[in-house]
Amino acid sequence: MRSGWSRRNPPNGFSLVECLVVVALLGILATLAIPSSSAVQRRLELDSALRRLRVGLDRGRMAAERDRQPCALELSANGWQPPLAGDLPACRGGMTPLVETGEGELELRSNLPDAVRFSTNGLVLDGGLVVVSHPSHAQALCLVIGLPLGISRSGVYRGDPRSALSSALCQPSDA
């Protein structure tokens, strides 16, 4: 006696081939949706460098106010450093490296004077634009240091960081 079960009641579930095709398609979609880890790492390095620039500037202001003495910091490729020349002492505690550990590939450009000066009441006496970029990342971040309180804005630099710098090209980030 033959059973007609297979013709009348199809089996429930999916075949192994169907499951493998769905898993493969989901894997392809996932790789397209997730940005590459190196791009994310470069963006995090840029964000961290911009934060460190802000922290160094704030520390310089606080040091001048705390010590009740004008002081200065110099911005180099490695971050905030004691000034190499000038009449003002370095702001105590203001030295802040651009990267947390090791040597980074970050590029720093600015139109700041050799030394950024701070008054005894913590006001910034020199302003300008700082642009931080990475050779393998499309976006550059920027920091506009306005007078007398320091930072007036930060964001994404919408120009070529290797050409003449303009604070008008420092626009708020979309995110």
Image: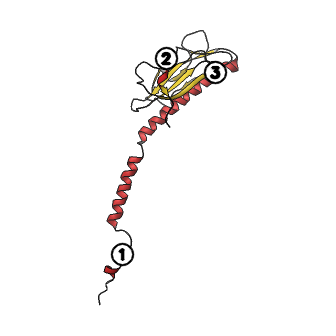
Q: Residue visible at 38% across and 73% down?
A: 12
- C-alpha span from label 1 to label 3: 75 Å
Q: Which residue is mark 1?
A: 11
Q: Which callout, 1 or 3, points to the residue nearer the camera?
A: 1
* Residue 49 image point, x, y percent: 51, 29
The residue most toward the top is 87
Q: Position of residue 105 (x, y in %)?
A: 43, 29
Report which residue position mark 2 lands on.
111
- Categorize mark 3 by other alpha carbons within 10 Å: few (<14), some (14-19), many (20+): many
Type of residue at label 1? Pro
Q: From what the image shows, is residue 120 above or below residue 151?
A: above
Q: Which residue reaches farthest bottom?
A: 1
Quarter of the N terminus within the rendering: bottom left
What residue type is disc 2 on? Asn
Which disc, if any, is residue 61?
A: 3
Instruction: Please report whichever mark, 2 or 3, sits nearer to the chain's N-terminal start.
Output: 3
Q: Secondary structure at mark 2?
A: loop
Q: Earlier in the sequence, mark 1 or mark 3?
A: 1
